[in-house]
Amino acid sequence: MKPAGGSSQSQISNYTMAQVKEFSVEEKLTALVNLQKIDSKLDELHILKGELPMEVADLEDEIQGLHARQTRIEEEINGVTEFIQQRKDAIKEAEALEKKYEKQSSNVKNNREFEAINKEIEMQQLEVKLAEKHIKDATEEIAEKAVLLEKAKKNIAAKEGILGTKKGELEKIIAANEKEEKHFNKLAAEAKENVDPRLFASYEKIRKSYRNGLAVVPVERDACGGCFYSIPPQKQSEIKQHKKVMICENCGRILVDEDLNNSIEIK
């Protein structure tokens, strides 16, 4: 006699299996075509933005670099200004010492002391001349850096003007298509849930390989709709039967027949 729980366990197992739906190849292809058409709509909206998103990002990076350059120049000017002040303080100190030694020279008792004091006075005079030369050179350096700083500021202002224009253009395009983009993004999220995970992985890989983003294409005029490679009649017949997923031998895109492709409309 079988245990009472055996029948119940079997029922649960059968119920679980019934819950897992197996999609036919045609259903899988239909889901892929649907996703491709939605993604193509989104691609069209992105094309409307053109190079603007990249141009805006590049300008923002460039302006950030220019601001860093401006800050560096300002710090260098501040450093040189501090150096000039130090040299001015050194001049005051040297001049004060010179006066001190000159006063002491009137009280010297012998030639040796007189020569020693004169030597100190000469050293302070030399210190003053050297400091004055340093100040002159540093002042010229500040003047050169001030020119560079002014150029950097003008460059930043010009770039920020261009950035403002580009951002304005981009914002207008985004605002004009925001509702439509949200709609297709929602459709895309829903469509992805209906695509076989392994097929979706292949689909995404193929999409990234081509600038136009076409991973699923119809056979048109006996050729692949992606690369126009000729498709033999036998293979076209197999594609129409929807018994297996067919790939273009030349470009690797997923192929579907025109009837299946045209049966799906995205609104």
Image (cartoon, rainbow, N blue to C red):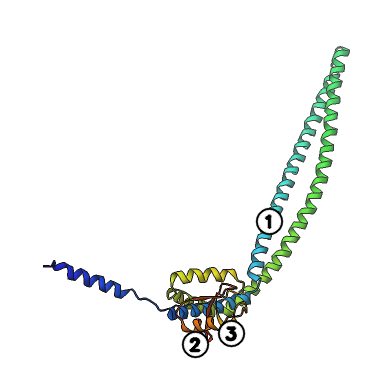
Which amino acid lies under the numbered mark 1 shown in the image of this protein? Gly
Give the label on residue 170, or none.
Answer: none
Is 62 in front, or is 196?
196
Name the residue located 58 percent from the left edge and 84 percent from the top edge: 220
- Compute the Cα span from label 3 to label 2: 15 Å
- Which mark is in front, 1 or 2? 2
Image location of residue 206, percent across then percent down: 55, 70
Q: Is residue 238 left or right of residue 175?
A: left
Mark pair 1, 2: CA separation: 53 Å
Task: Tell me the quarter of the picture where residue 112 sits.
Answer: top right
Circle count: 3
Out of 193 and 5, give the one closest to the viewer. Answer: 5
**79 left or right of 111 in image:** left
- Neighbor class of circle 3 (other Cα within 10 Å; few <14, some 14-19, many 20+) is some
Disc 1 element: helix
Residue type of the residue flagged with mark 2? Ser
Q: Amino acid at mark 3?
A: Glu
Q: Are marks 1 and 3 in contact (CB under 8 Å)?
A: no
Question: Which residue position holds label 1?
Answer: 65
State the residue at coordinates (22%, 72%): 11
**Residue position marked by numbered label 2 in the rendering:** 263
Q: Secondary structure at mark 3?
A: strand
Q: Is residue 179 visible?
A: no
Q: Extreme top residue here?
A: 110
Mark-to-mark CA distance, 1 and 3? 51 Å
Which residue is disc 3 drawn over?
Answer: 220
